[in-house]
Amino acid sequence: MNTITIEGVLRTEHGKKAARQIRSQENVPGVIYGGAEEVNFYASAKAFKSLVYTGEFQLAEVTVGAKKYKCILKDLQFDKVSDQLIHVDLLELVGDKKVIATLPIKFTGVSVGVKVKS
């Protein structure tokens, strides 16, 4: 399992106007939840590329200020017209909490009960 490193910046302003301004600078707003506190941040759209556009299950290590958060991707939002990433939700992995995640499964080989025509 790969770990992607993302450098984030803590968001001080919230709301539609602030999010539009962040997106206009080619950044993506996001939130980290599931831990002790909810963290609102933004990062470059390029930083999320290897996390979002893959069929593999990956971990994300997000650095916001002086703190590091180990997370998994929980939800994404794309623009309906341009199909650009506009928001990311990450779930923080905490040692004593259980997490439900969707994992991609790849089947290999052929079952004994299946005949293969050659």
Image (spheres, rainbow, N blue to C red):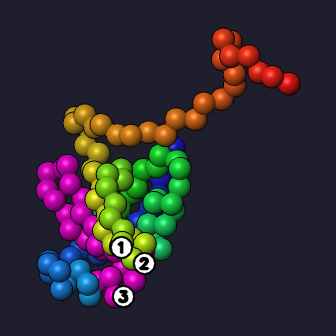
**Is label 3 or label 2 in front?**
2
Residue type of the residue flagged with mark 1: Asp
The label on residue 108 is none
Q: Is residue 83 left or right of residue 32?
A: right
Local packing at callout 3 (Cα closer than 10 Å; few below 14, some 14-19, many 20+) is few
Gap between marks 3 and 2 measured at Cα: 16 Å
In percent of width and height, residue 6 lies at 41, 66
Measuring 51% from the left and 60% from the top, which residue is drawn there? 53
What residue did someone put label 1 on? 79
What residue did someone put label 2 on? 82
Gap between marks 1 and 3 measured at Cα: 16 Å
Local packing at callout 2 (Cα closer than 10 Å; few below 14, some 14-19, many 20+) is few
Q: Which of the 4 quarters of the picture holds residue 88?
A: bottom left
Residue type of the residue flagged with mark 2: Ser
What residue did someone put label 3 on? 25
- Under circle 3, the secondary element is loop
With respect to residue 1, does 63 lie above or below? below
What range is drawn magenta here? 22-45
Q: Are marks 2 and 1 in contact (CB under 8 Å)?
A: yes
Measuring 26% from the left and 88% from the top, which residue is drawn there? 21
Nearest the camera: 105 or 79? 79
Mark 1 or mark 3: whose residue is earlier in sequence = 3
Gap between marks 2 and 1 measured at Cα: 6 Å
Mark 3 or mark 2: whose residue is earlier in sequence = 3
